[in-house]
Image (spheres, rainbow, N blue to C red):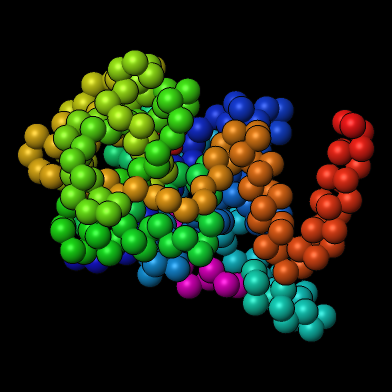
């Protein structure tokens, strides 16, 4: 069965972006001219995924509004002949969105379990919108291709420096191909000394519906949260799980510095501002050089 559905967890409190996230969702923070979550939706839509299940919480209603039709705005743009903008706001109108509230932010595993009634018995993708993948890198498509070939869950991996390993789920595995590992163990956010490798799980997964039964009987793990990593470790006792090593460009926009990097680099690719922005960056880097010399 092909991957047609995606779950996007978006119920977190966004504490790393306070005060911006006091009353607005982190997922709606704009990077250039699109909210963060739209990059993940577009990435999945480019792979033929057309059903989106967004796990939300209180203060997250603007996400629902964002992916809804805004007919008065459409009318206004039509009347003014602003066809390009009209096209832009309707570009995702063929996609279906469902929203489920998580209630309490009890962890990624808990968030994913909420989507079971919508996913039922199909394979599905999970995209964590904090991780922005450069569009030309086609990570999700490569993971779907691998899933179609092997019919096993696939998680995205990235080699990360030892000092950052404690921020991620980490795997042990056996190399089976250029970028493919058969996973033999998983640990959620280990101390560097306990990490089984430097291969960290990043925010893209292709999962099979048997994960829901595991999630349903899970106990809280690291940080008292229901961890998806622990559920995958449990599932590993019954079936193979693979890791796909990503070697392209990822921005960790869940972090202030990563958010700024994403903003700068995606602005450099945006046809609307790239030329002007590039000259501006050259100008300020010259200025910074003279200030420091
Ligand atoms: C979650 C997962 C972790 C994974 C990470 C990727 O952690 O629990 O295993 O490595 O996403 O971004 P979070 O960043 O939500 O704390």
Q: Is residue 189 above or below residue 101?
A: above
Which residue is located at x 67 percent, y 62 percent?
A: 269
Residue extending farthest to the front is 293
Q: Looking at the picture, how far across and down is residue 112, in whole percent?
A: 33, 40
Q: Quadrant of residue 267?
A: bottom right
Displayed-image quarter of ligand 1: top left
Camera-side residue: 55 or 246? 246
Q: In this view, does 245 lie above or below 276?
A: above
Q: Looking at the picture, how far across and down is residue 87, in whole percent?
A: 65, 77
26 lies left or right of 122: right
Q: In this view, does 18 lie above or below 89?
A: above
Q: Looking at the picture, how far across and down is residue 179, in whole percent?
A: 30, 52
Residue 169 sits inside the magenta stretch:
no
Q: How many labels does the image show?
A: 0
159 lies left or right of 249: left
Q: Looking at the picture, how far across and down is residue 206, in whole percent?
A: 29, 52
Which residue is located at x 20 percent, y 31 percent?
A: 185
Camera-side residue: 255 or 292? 292
Camera-side residue: 111 or 29? 29
Residue 99 sits inside the magenta stretch:
yes
Q: Quadrant of residue 234?
A: top left
Q: Quadrant location of the C terminus?
A: top right
**Residue 123 seen by the camera:** no
Which residue is located at x 47 percent, y 60 percent?
A: 137
Which residue is located at x 55 percent, y 29 percent?
A: 13
Please give the range of residues in magenta.
90-100
């Amino acid at each position: 069965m092909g991957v047609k559905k995606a779950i996007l967890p978006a119920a977190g409190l966004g504490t790393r972006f306070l005060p911006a996230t006091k009353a607005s969702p982190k997922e709606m923070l704009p990077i250039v001219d699109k909210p963060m979550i739209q990059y993940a939706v577009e990435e999945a839509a480019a792979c033929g995924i057309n059903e989106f299940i967004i796990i939300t919480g209180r203060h997250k209603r603007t996400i629902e509004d964002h992916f809804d039709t805004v007919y008065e705005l459409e009318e206004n743009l039509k009347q003014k002949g602003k066809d390009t903008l009209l096209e832009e706001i309707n570009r995702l109108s063929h996609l279906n969105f469902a929203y489920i509230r998580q209630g309490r932010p009890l962890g990624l595993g808990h968030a994913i379990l909420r989507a079971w009634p919508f996913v039922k018995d199909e394979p599905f993708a999970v995209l964590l919108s904090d991780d922005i993948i450069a569009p030309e890198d086609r990570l999700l498509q490569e993971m779907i291709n691998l899933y179609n070939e092997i019919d096993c869950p696939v998680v995205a991996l990235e080699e990360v420096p030892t000092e950052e390993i404690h921020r991620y789920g980490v795997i042990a595995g056996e190399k089976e191909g250029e970028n493919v590992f058969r996973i033999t163990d998983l640990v959620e956010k280990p101390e560097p000394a306990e990490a089984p490798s430097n291969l960290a799980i990043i925010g893209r997964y292709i999962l099979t519906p048997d994960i829901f039964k595991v999630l349903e009987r899970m106990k809280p793990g690291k940080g008292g949260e229901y961890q998806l990593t622990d559920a995958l470790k449990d599932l590993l006792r019954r079936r193979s799980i693979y890791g796909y090593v990503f070697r392209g460009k990822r921005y960790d926009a869940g972090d202030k510095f990563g958010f700024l990097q994403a903003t700068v680099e995606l602005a450099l690719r945006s046809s609307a501002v790239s030329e002007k922005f590039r000259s501006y960056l050259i100008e300020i880097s010259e200025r910074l050089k003279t200030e420091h010399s």
